[in-house]
Image (cartoon, rainbow, N blue to C red):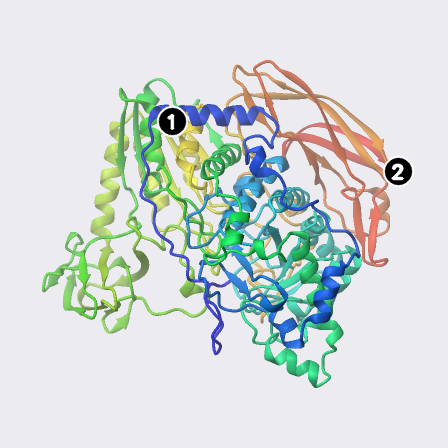
Amino acid sequence: MPHAPLPEQPEPSRRDTPVTALAPRRISRRRLLLTLAGAAALSAAPSLAGGIPAAAARPRVPGGTPAKGRVSERVADLLARLTLEEKSALLHGATDPEGLGQAGYVPGIPRLGIPPLRLADGPAGVRVREHATALPAPVMLAAAFDPGLARAYGQVIGQEGRALGQDVLLSPMVNLIRTPYAGRNFETFSEDPLLSADMVAEEIRGIQAEGLIATVKHVALNNQEHGRMSVDVRAGEQTLHETELRGFEAAVAAGTGAVMAAYNKVDGVHATESRMLLTDVLRGQWGFEGWVMSDWGAVHATAALTAGCDMEMPGGRHFGAPLVTAVREGRIDEADVDTAVRRLLTVRERFGALDASSAGGSGAAAGRSARPARDAAAGARVALNVALAGATLLRNENRTLPLAGQAARSLAVIGPTGKVPFVSGGGSAHVVPDAATSPLDALRTRAGGGATVTYALGEDPYGKPLPATGAAFTPAPDLDAVQVAAGKTHRYEGTFTTTADDDWSFFVHYGGKRPTVTLDGAELFPTQSGDAEVFNGGLGGTAADGLTLRRADRRLTAGTHRLTVTAAGGTTGQLVRLRAADGTTRTADLTEATAAARAAHSVVLFAYEDATEGRDRGRLALPGRQDDLIKAVTAVNPRTTVVLNTSSAVTMPWLADTGAVLQMYYPGQEGGPATAAVLFGDADPGGRLTQTFPSGDDAHPTAGDPGRYPGKDGVERYAEGIHVGYRWYDAEDVTPLFPFGHGLSYTTFRYEGLAVAPDRGGLRVSFTVANTGTRAGIDVPQVYVGPSPDLAGLGIDQPRRLLAGYQRLRLAPGERRKVTVSVTARTLSSWDEARHRWVLGTGAREVSVGASARTLTLRARAAVRTP
């Protein structure tokens, strides 16, 4: 959702929250070891352990689900006393006079004692002006395959949202990972409907147990950023119900208070105007009794109200004065307005958000006293636990990991995200915590005083001072620390000469209004349209010292080029820097990195991909010249571990030359200590892939077909049908780079004794898992089920296999444990488009158990019967 206000109307901006960089926080060895000891205890305990302390976790409101169909006397009385104008005011956003930096605000009705409502972004923490706990990205949470941990994750956000003056959380996101290019893959959970449903349901329960209203988003088929405001998504009825909608249905069953309608169209109709989605399915089939809000700027007509969209955000272009006029002119029945207001008030009453004491903001003394204090320490514990649980070891050859012996005493750390914590992705998910420890500091602390841990940048995301490049400037630029005073303007005009064609990158760092920089008469950093201007990544949008950062890449021919810089100080003054990178600086960085790698026994190389809302990726390769860097480093030191701070799948042309590859996604504020703990073996890598990693840009479900992605002539067709993710790889017999569910441990496991029995229309699957290694470790055995012969006879499409259940285990060396997984009738059912309902897939079905979708070691057949 965009942070910029809609044009032509004085509506609230979502750019209030400063996105400042994090100064790496040094930690003592004692603190690190104590923290990791606590995390290890958590991983051995039930999955909810280590969350918010019991006193803080006590639900502020009764129950997690609403009383069906009940309208209280209080809500009925308020509705009867509200004027039409007041009803309208409750159904759209406005500017917050308190300015807490949250995404949205709805004024209260003082004469009736209805307080205002504040709505904050929060996929990985509460995004407001104040600092908050930056949790690992949701995709990393899902990698733990632990719904109980998702509840603890939700509890942190719920408690902090209340503490920071918020009433509604604009999260969680449960749209499926359909294409690896989607810019928000890090914000959601998985390519699998079952895993996504399990995670979203428990996170919502955690959020709402703390008294914060959750908003599941974005209904529906919002699986890409490219053209998201207008693309028309076409998916068949079976595809819609069996894939994308399953997570939303689970969220409704968990009692979510609100639902957000997407930007895109579905079958030719904007999601905010889709009666099929918002009324027939959401309320008719699932019985949802909360309220539906629009994504920011997603309402296109006042008639969206009658389709089932109750609230327009962030302003009132359609649900403000136009709605009042439409009612008075008889084009919209006031009863429809009453229905929307009733839904909103009922949810607010359920969560205590109709009480004056619930109001946030600096002016609400009573509200402040009623809200909990933020518990940063509890949030940090959960952040660490999630980062450890989701750390996914993709490769580990010749016992490269864990680091021990000489490898632990002589180490080179390479890459910018080794030194600068990559806390979160860009866009509305970006959270700025109180502090974050860099992986480099955590590794040095863990290695101890007798070890040598060197550092080399490798790939520069911020640029070098201009004289460091291979060009001669006239006059000599002094642009690396320009302090422009208030009311003043700094100008530079000059030329530089390049001796060869080369790829250049220019970087402008600034603390106020963006400077104007031209190269050969063309603006290097022009204002972009829409989301491209607002969102610029979680790493690349901010310099190491907190200045705003923009980058421009240009291919320059040999010769003379003219450069101008104009920087205004504005009302408060600002600091400005202009930097660049070219072949000369890149060669120097690469030389430094390979020298460090050659001199050390082992290498930990951090690579990154900076994803953000509002922009899809253009390719699966790591950006810049990181692939070349990895190839150069592994050529001089094969004992190299590559740590990936990426949002989604990347290609790995260097994979066979590495010792190990550790997927850490965007690991939150505790990512540094978590990474160090896994690398040194203080914690077993507990994560498994929630999305298939393809071998290349030509080998994934949306490859080679622009109709599937990004869409053709404004229409995107889900031609793969129900075969999303690993199901497509099975259907097409395509071998991925890494399969869904893949992840290694520092120990080994064996599965045996598979037994399957019917169980009330479902199946009860039992087997034994044994730790056959010498270390304690985490395993995630997965249960997959094959197609039903009876449904095949009806012509209903089915996957070759689908995830039917899983269990996260921690086993001591030599320990054996019997596992029982219940496979529900819903999981064994398919959507019958002819009858518009679920149909149980009866008959003999294959049941497989293994460590991933492609590593299945136990098989049996069992009969599924109608109960």
Residue drawn at x 75%, y 39% as measured from the top left: 786
Residue 829 position in % (x across, y down): 80, 45
Q: Residue at x 72, y 60 (%)?
A: 74
Circle 1 sits in a helix, a strand or a loop, which is it?
A: helix
How far from the left and from the top, in percent, is residue 352? 64, 52
Q: In which quarter of the image is residue 284?
A: bottom right
Looking at the image, is mark 2 or mark 1 earlier in the sequence? 1
Q: For the point 50% across and 57% down, which residue is it?
A: 364
The residue that appears at 53% across and 53% down in the rendered structure is 366
> What's the amino acid at mark 1?
Arg
Q: What element carries label 2?
A: loop
Label ID, residue 865 = 2
Image depth: mark 2 or mark 1 in front? 1
Q: How far apart are marks 2 and 1 (CA)?
A: 56 Å
User: Which labelled disc corresponds to residue 378?
Assistant: none
Q: How crowded is mark 2: few (under 14 residues within 10 Å), some or many (20 or more)?
A: some
Counting from the top left corner in percent of width and height, residue 341 is at 69, 66
How far across and how far down the image is residue 596, in percent? 25, 33
Q: Name the residue under label 1.
A: 31
- Seen in the picture, residue 404 relative to 461 is either above or below; the reply is above
Q: Is residue 472 shown to the viewer in this render?
A: yes
Q: In which quarter of the image is residue 29?
A: top left
